Image (spheres, helix red, strand yellow):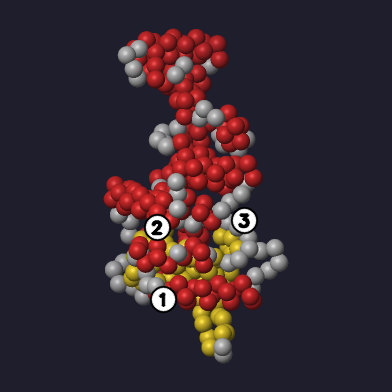
Amino acid sequence: MSIDLLHNKRAEYGKQIVVSLARQLVSQYGNNFEEKNLRRMIQFYNVFPDEQIVVSAIRQLSWTHFVALIPLKHPLQREFYAEMCRIEKWNVKTLREKIDGMLYERTAISKKPGQLIKQEIKQLRDKDKLTPDLVFRDPYFLDFLGLKNTFSEKNLEDAILRELEGFILELGQGFSFVERQKRMIIDGKDFRLDLLFYHRKLKRLIAIDLKLGEFKAGYKSQMELYLRWLEKNEMQAGEKTPIGLLLCAEGNKEQIELLQLHKSGIKIAEYLTELPSKKLLQQKLHQVVEISKKQIENNK
C-alpha cells in the first residue's frame, strides 16, 4: 500500500483498509500489528524503498531505531543517520540526541552536492570507510563547559580538560586524547599545540588549536607548521597524514574560502559556548550549506 493512498482523494478508503487489516492481524498475531504500528510499517516501506540499505542496516538497528528515522524529511539525511548509527553502534537514545543536535546538518558532508553525499554514504555502507567529512562538524556545541561572557584561551582549554569526556563525545566516536600543550622544538624555538588527539578509524593524529574571536589568515601557516612537524616526528607506520582543526568563536567565510584550507589538511569550525534557539541554528546552518554548495559549484 502506498503512503499516497492515505493523503489523496482516496485517503478515507485507505484508512479503512488499514483499520480493517490491523484488526485481522491483531486477532491472528497479537498487538504488535495494531493500527498505529501498521501505519509505521507503511511509512517504513515508503521511506526506505532500497532493500540493500535496509539489509545493511537491519543487522544492527532495531525497529525502534527505524521509528526514530522515519520522520526525517530528506533521504540522504536518513541514510546518514542509519549508517552512522550502524557503524558507531548508537543506542536509540543516542540516535535521538544526534538528530536533535542536528549532527547531519553540522557535518562537512551535508555541505556537498547530493551526488557526492550519496557516494560517501555508499562507501560507508559498503566498505565501512569513514572519511574526515563524516567526522568533523561545524559548529561544535561546547555549552557543557559552563563558560559565560569573557574568557581566555587558557580558560577554554582548562574547561575542555575538566570536561574531557563531554568534549570527546561532542567531537564524535573514535577520538582519543593524546596530549595537552604538545611541545615542538623548531629552529631552537618552542612551539605548543593546544590539544593533540588521535582518531582510530581515520588513523590520523588530530591537532586542535583553540582561538578566541574570529578566524585570521595567519592561523593557517601556524597550523601547517604543526602538521608538518607531527608528520615528520610523530606519525607512525600505517597512519595517514595528520589533520588540523582550528576551533574559532567566529569564522571569516571569504578568507576561509580563498585560503583553501582543505588542501592543507586543515578544518575550520566555530564553537558555541551558549546554544541559540533551534530555529535560529537551523537558519544559520541552512545559510552555511547553501554558501558551501555554491562555492563547490563555482570551483568546478
Q: Dot 1 lies on which element?
A: helix
> Residue, x 56% and y 81% (percent of image)?
184
- In the rendered structure, find residue 139 and report the number of the disc placed on it: 2
Marks 1 & 2, CB-CB < 8 Å contact: no
Disc 2 marks which amino acid? Pro
**On screen, 223 above or below 91?**
below
Query: Sequence order check: which comes first, mark 1 or mark 3?
Result: 3
- Within 10 Å of the Cα at label 3, are there few (<14), some (14-19), or many (20+) other Cα atoms? some
Residue at the extreme right: 237
Quadrant of res 145: bottom left
Q: Which residue is mark 1?
A: 218
Q: Which residue is mark 3?
A: 201
- Residue 224 is situated, as x and y percent measured from the top left of the image, at 51, 73
Query: How much space separates mark 1 and mark 3, taking CA atoms?
Result: 30 Å
- Residue 63 is situated, as x and y percent measured from the top left of the image, at 53, 31
- Within 10 Å of the Cα at label 1, are there few (<14), some (14-19), or many (20+) other Cα atoms? few
Q: Is residue 17 left or right of residue 50?
A: left
Disc 1 marks which amino acid? Gly
> Residue, x 47% and y 22% (percent of image)?
42
Disc 3 marks which amino acid? Lys
Residue at the extreme front: 300
